[in-house]
Image: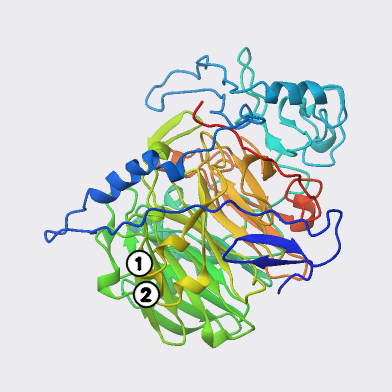
Amino acid sequence: MQSNNYFYSSPNYFFDYKKPFTWTNHVVHYQQHELANRKIEERNENRMANVMPWLLSMSLLGFQQFAAHPGIAPISRELEAPIFPLRDSSAGNPVSYEKLSTPTSCDSYGNSLENKLAGTTERNNILYGSTPITAGRFFQSNNRDYARNIGDVFKNNAHSINQLEFHGFNYDLNHEPVEDEYVGPAMSLVYAWSTVDFEFNNIEERDQAIFDGDYIAENNLPLGLEIHQNRVFITLPKWKEGIPVTLATVPRYSKTKSPKLKPYPDWDWNMSDKCDDLTSVFRIQVDECDRLWVLDSGVTNIARKPTQSCPPALYIFDLRTDKLIKKYTLPQEQVKQDSLFTNIVVDIRDGDCGGAIAYLSDVWRFGLIVYDFYKDSSFRFEHHLFFPDPLAAKYELHGIKFQWTDGIFGIALSPIDIHDDRTLFFHPMSSFREFAVSTSVLRDKRMVDHNTDKFIPIGRPRAKDYGHSSGSVVDRNGVMFFNMVTRDSVWCWDTRKEYIPENLGVIGTSNISLVFPNDIKVDHEEEQSVWMISNRLPMYLYENLDSSKINFRIFKAHVKDAVKDTICDPDHVVPDYGQGYDETC
């Protein structure tokens, strides 16, 4: 459903309003970038990975086109490397603190701006938009949105509202970190589990599954989600052994916060060893035609010894009958050695269900597959913007340090624009940048090959450090929501505005409840809500989850409430920023 309040114009990538506004014909133009077009040989004849993509990835840092424009630094301190407790995950010692160097400001502009606002209501404004201020320090309260002094966490100014000042809440070098379950005034907790259980047919079957090792409770980790009418769909990839179900549902209006998961479509689809059934699903997509698109990676034992147990496949179910409409197995030539297909978005125009186009991302081998439902065919292509940034491959989350070289991961579609087109936004997991391409370029392989320069980076890095984002989604009004996995938070961006840190808002954050927010979706209701799942994935992979505590949570927020009084609100107009910060100073 297309909003009537704006139009989105591509390939110039800018939004504007159709209705009169406070600024006449106000348009924010995105700066255009020219990209180096390089042909990359993916593998040699021995099927060994070619080092050229990595060399190209690193060489991008030297290209003049990718150099940041020098300028002032009005927010450099807000999104510098975060300050938070550091702990070596291999050590058994209590949490210790390392004193970090103070971020450097490149110019006096930032200080002068802060001084200018120091005595104004804008400087001491509100957390999450419209939350009243109190004089108290953070403390436990049943009414948290009225019980915190937010001056140390968020700050407002004429250019930036609802932005994080630090990586986590309540950090003080002289005190233990305060754990905070509160996420935000718009957020409501829908589900919470310490471990996941399933609706077995009877207790004997459950006991037998435990005895046989088919069900090991602590190995089951919810990861993807989707919403359709009265059901919430949840995926459980086969990270380890003992995961009997890879796709399940829970009631949207459950009597309990921790319902048992019901296999979808049924147990036979999940427990079979045949490749005709489901194997290992990461993410799914519900389209406007009441169909569920299931991207099955076919990879099992991912955390320990990844095994391609079955070919990657796309399953499409009719949600009115829960029957399979179509299965499409990806051609062998489109699946690379060690491919891992983890994300999917579906593009439907004017209610043409038969003309659906699906985009599937290969996070480990940096490719995108375009599937045409009508033709029942697909093609694969690569682009250097799909590759991870080697400088963003270092992660740290609550003291756990690790390295991931994950490529294209988050993919999201804009609303239909005035040219009857959509923009595909995408980013590698190991990157701090967002990229975009018009979907008109992606209709066939020849078009892609002749338009590699249409893939562009947009704006500036979302953060100078710890800017990793997993899933992303765009609502009907063109507002993007995305998970910041190393900042325990969910951010937003009004895609009419330039993609720069000043224009990024925060709709929720918690160092307990949003530890590694993984997947994020907007539902199909007339008044849309944004849904997100957090699952503490690094703790699951590199440590052990504590089954005495809540590990998995699903939140939802009405879109209008989430963006109210933030920079992401479509009704909030920002001035021209001129030059951005100089990240090389």
In the displayed structure, would residue 474 be above or below residue 552? Answer: below
Q: Image check: 3 left or right of 481?
A: right
Compute the Cα span from label 1 to label 2: 7 Å
Q: Image check: 228 left or right of 49?
A: right
Q: Image check: 561 left or right of 48?
A: right
**Residue corresponding to mark 1:** 381
Q: Image check: 419 left or right of 242?
A: right
Q: Is residue 513 visible?
A: no
Residue type pointed to by label 1:
Phe
The outermost residue toward the top is 174
Q: Position of residue 83 (x, y in %)?
A: 57, 24
Category of crowding for the residue at label 2, using alpha-carbon neighbours closer than 10 angstroms: few (below 14), some (14–19), many (at least 20): some
Tell me whether the residue at label 1 lies in contact with that at label 2, contact meaning CB atoms closer than 8 angstroms. yes
- Residue visible at 45% across and 48% down? 429
Q: Position of residue 323 (x, y in %)?
A: 51, 84
Residue 445's disc number: 2
Q: To which quarter of the image does residue 496 belong?
A: bottom right
**Most foreground residue, 385 or 332:** 385
**Most foreground residue, 313 or 376:** 376
State the SS at label 1: strand
Q: Position of residue 200 (x, y in %)?
A: 50, 66
Dot placed on the residue nearer the N-terminal end, 1 or 2? 1
